[in-house]
Image (cartoon, rainbow, N blue to C red):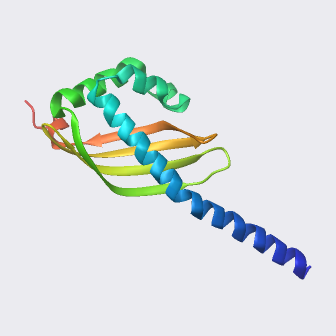
Amino acid sequence: MGLVKRLNSGVLLGVVMLWGCSAPVDIGAASGAGKKFHDEFNQQNYDKMYQEADPKFRSAVQSDAWSKLMTRVHDKLGNVTDATRTGFNVNYNVGGSTVTITYATKFQLGEGQEEFVWLKSNDELRLLHYNVRSSALDESHVQ
């Protein structure tokens, strides 16, 4: 019985070590995906961004709503000029892992905070969730 417990503990430790080693790789890949997103945003390739997103994203967000949102963000804020990562989280699951990255983002016409959630499946990252906040997008003060 003691041998089985030691083997199970060893296997668990090995799995944890593997996950710990892959987190920096996944964060790097998600950062690269964020840069690609910003490049596509700056080129106003919203349809391409949408088509490359995860199917779960596309089932929750209609293509025309995505294009309207991205057009509004671009009209109000302009191109992304710089993005500084402010946080990250990696969550490993059997059905696919998620990597969340947050940025303090500078645009031509203002600043904002962005959150990306990328779904990793079969060594591929696809956009699962995107959120941007900026006072330039807040219309609560508009009459």
Residue 91 occupies quadrant:
bottom right
Residue 50 is left or right of residue 56, and the answer is left
Residue, far right:
1
Quarter-wise, where is residue 39 in the image?
top left
Residue at 62% from the left image edge and 44% from the top image edge: 96
Number of marks present in the image shown: 0
* Residue 90 image point, x, y percent: 51, 55
Outermost residue on the top side: it is 64
Q: Is residue 138 left or right of residue 33?
A: left
Q: In this image, 33 relative to 68: left or right?
A: right
**Res 70 quadrant in image:** top left
Q: Residue at x 46, y 51 (%)?
A: 28
Placement of 61 over or under 91, stated as above or below: above
Residue 100 x %, y %: 44, 50
Q: Please, is residue 25 above or below residue 112 in the view?
A: below
Residue at image position (55%, 28%) is: 55
Give the residue at the far bottom of this rendering: 2
Q: Quadrant of the N terminus?
A: bottom right
Residue 51 position in % (x across, y down): 47, 23
Residue displayed at 64% across by 67% down: 17
* Residue 121 percent across, percent down from the top left: 61, 40
Compared to residue 16, the image places residue 42 above or below, namely above
